[in-house]
Image: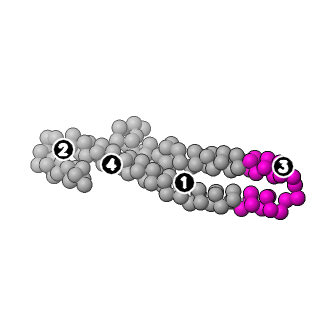
């Protein structure tokens, strides 16, 4: 809240100082862009904690438990075969969950989704 008030105050003061309007506007743009990038970072971390840790974990554990219970109860195999199949399935589920989280929640993907590259290029004057 303090940053927003300071940015507004900076714009207000810059209108009175005609010689430094361009400088104050640049500072204001950089501050707003910094706040935007921080908001993207915070939203990414929020979605990682809510979606990645919450819903995906519940669904993964439910699937693992149901498949393994089915193997142990209904499969006409020896106990050693059941344990081996169960362990192979568990390792596969854990690796696939880690790969999905790593793929969807990378910083580069979120920065591209919120077009932060174009914002940075616009502020730095690069084409």
Q: Quadrant of the C terminus?
A: top left
Sequence order check: which comes first, mark 1 or mark 3? 1
Q: Name the residue under label 4.
A: 35
Q: Main secondary structure of the magenta part?
A: helix
Q: Are marks 1 and 3 in contact (CB under 8 Å)?
A: no
Mark 2 vs mark 4: which is more N-terminal? 2
Tell me which segment is drawn in magenta.
66-89
Residue under the point 64% across and 57% down: 60
Task: Classify the position of the N terminus by image quarter.
Answer: bottom left
Residue that numbered label 3 is attached to: 81
Picture disc at residue 52: 1
Q: Residue at x 53, y 58 (%)?
A: 54
The mark found on residue 101 in the picture is none
> How much space separates mark 2 and mark 4, taking CA atoms?
21 Å
Nearer to me, 27 or 60: 60
Of discs 1 and 3, which sits in the foreground?
3
Q: What element carries label 4?
A: helix
Nearer mark to the viewer, of 1 and 2: 1
Q: Nearer the viewer, mark 2 or mark 4?
A: 4
- Asked if residue 61 is positioned above or below residue 104 in the image, the reply reads below
Q: Do the residues labelled 4 and 1 touch (CB within 8 Å)?
A: no
92 vs 15, left or right, is right
Label 2 sits on residue? 21
The one nearer the camera, 76 or 121, is 76
Q: Which of marks 2 and 3 is nearer the N terminus?
A: 2
Task: Work out which residue is located at the far front of the displayed protein and give it.
Answer: 79
Place of residue 43 in the rendered image (x, y in percent of width and height, measured from the top left)? 43, 53
Pick whichever of labels 4 and 1 is earlier in the sequence: 4
Helix, strand, or loop for circle 2?
Answer: helix
């Amino acid at each position: 809240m303090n940053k927003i008030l300071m940015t507004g105050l900076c714009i207000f003061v810059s209108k009175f100082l005609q010689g430094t309007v361009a400088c104050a506007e640049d500072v204001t743009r950089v501050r707003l862009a910094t706040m935007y990038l921080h908001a993207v970072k915070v939203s990414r971390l929020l979605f990682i904690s809510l979606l990645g840790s919450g819903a995906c974990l519940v669904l993964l554990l439910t699937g693992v438990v149901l498949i393994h219970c089915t193997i142990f109860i209904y499969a006409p195999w020896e106990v050693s075969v059941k344990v081996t199949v169960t362990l192979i399935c568990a390792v596969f589920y854990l690796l696939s969950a880690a790969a999905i989280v790593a793929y969807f929640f990378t910083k580069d993907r979120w920065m591209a989704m919120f077009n932060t590259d174009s914002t940075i290029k616009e502020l730095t004057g690069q084409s």
